[in-house]
Image (cartoon, rainbow, N blue to C red):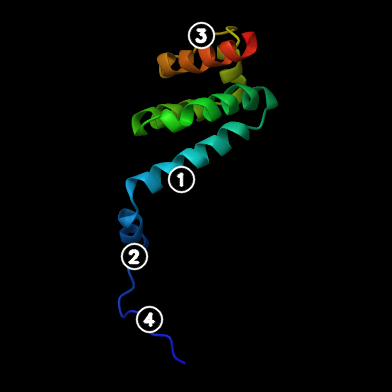
Amino acid sequence: MRVRTPAHPQPLSIMVRRMTAGEDIAMRRKRLRYRAWHRGTREMDLVLGPFADAEIEGLDTVELDRLERLMDEEDPALLTWVLGQAEPPAHVDSEFLERVIRSHRQRMSA
């Protein structure tokens, strides 16, 4: 039996655009949650992982962008900011970082 293939297969970009927005954001959330738990340093895993578990389903695309930019920072620098040992540079989204820090402190005091 011969399988027919389309004369002009659809490019991947068209297939991706046909995905529903819910599927696309669900995949992004899953990827970011994994990334939050697999940072490279256990200390930051324990800060960002629980934050992602607790918050990621409620984050919209803009907030996911903010989380992703924060997670692009190096672990040693992030850890010093979370611990209050250093001030983050101007390019860091201090408001979102503070949200992560508050979440971490609430978990530690519970």
The image position of residue 29, as x and y in percent, is 47, 38
Front of the two marks 2 and 3 = 2
Report the amino acid beneath label 4: Thr
Q: Earlier in the sequence, mark 2 or mark 3?
A: 2
Front of the two marks 1 and 3 = 1
Front of the two marks 2 and 1 = 1
Q: Nearer the viewer, residue 66 or 110?
A: 110
Visible in this render: residue 68? no
Q: State the separation of the CA atoms marked 2 and 1.
A: 20 Å
Query: Element at badge 4?
Result: loop
Query: Element at badge 3?
Result: loop
Q: Which residue is mark 3?
A: 87
Q: Quadrant of residue 62?
A: top left
- Give the numbered dot on residue 5: 4
Residue farthest toward the bottom in the current orientation of the protein = 1
Q: State the separation of the CA atoms marked 4 and 1.
A: 28 Å
Front of the two marks 3 and 4 = 4
Q: Are marks 4 and 2 in contact (CB under 8 Å)?
A: no
Q: Quadrant of residue 93?
A: top left
Q: Earlier in the sequence, mark 4 or mark 2?
A: 4
Drawn side of residue 20 relative to residue 30, left or right? left
Q: Which residue is mark 2?
A: 11
Label 2 crowding class (10 Å Cα cut-off): few <14, some 14-19, many 20+? few
Drawn side of residue 80 relative to residue 94, left or right? right
